[in-house]
Amino acid sequence: MNPSDQRTEGPPSGGIGAILGLDRLEMLRSDLGTPTVDEMIADFLREMPERLAELRRQAADGAWDAAEFGLHSLKGAGASLGLDALAEKLRAAEQMVVDGGARPVGPLLADLDRLVVLSSAAFTRWKDERPRTGEPVS
């Protein structure tokens, strides 16, 4: 697969529901409480630039097993937190490493950078606009 085929040119269409798993977020909010969910997601997104920098170093060094493990871990955490678009791109990056290791992953990592920004903005909007009754924002 050509890395350019994996590019995200802009935000996914469909509003924040195309970026976030709103049902998952509401379930987490119900189970864990709003402050806990907010803190978990904010921490994850805040750590992503450092984690992506580490993935770039691993790719540059040819440390594909470490890159695969890092991508897999981030994918699972992102999916668990309802960061669906980001988790899907992490899945694609992980699969690229599994399929070919030395393929250029730079464009895909740039897409991940963009999705972190989009996910953060969508999370902020969800947090600011979510109804206090527990009904999800669409």
Image (spheres, rainbow, N blue to C red):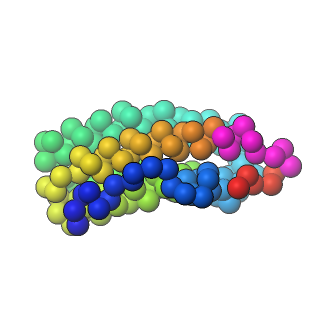
Q: Quadrant where the N terminus lies?
A: bottom left
Q: Residue furthest right?
A: 133
In the rendered image, is residue 82 in sight? no
Q: Quadrant of the C terminus?
A: bottom right
Residue at point 60% right, 58% down?
A: 14
Residue at 45% x, 46% y: name it: 115
Name the residue: 59% across, 44% down: 122
In the image, residue 96 above or below residue 37: below
* Vertical arrangement, residue 50 with respect to residue 103, above or below: above
User: Is residue 84 among what the camera can see?
Assistant: yes
Residue 89's spot in the image, x, y percent? 40, 56
Q: Is residue 126 left or right of residue 12?
A: right
The answer to which of 28 and 60 lies nearer the viewer is 60
Is 58 on the left or on the right of 85, as rendered? Answer: left
Residue 62, image x and y in percent?
13, 47
**Which residue sits at x=66%, y=52%?**
25
**In terms of depth relative to the viewer, which is nearer, 58 or 10?**
10
In the rendered image, residue 56 lying in the magenta stretch gets the answer no
Residue 44 x/y as whole percent: 50, 39
Q: Check if residue 131 falls in the magenta segment.
A: yes
Name the spot of residue 38 as percent of width and height, x first: 65, 38
* Region in magenta: 125-133
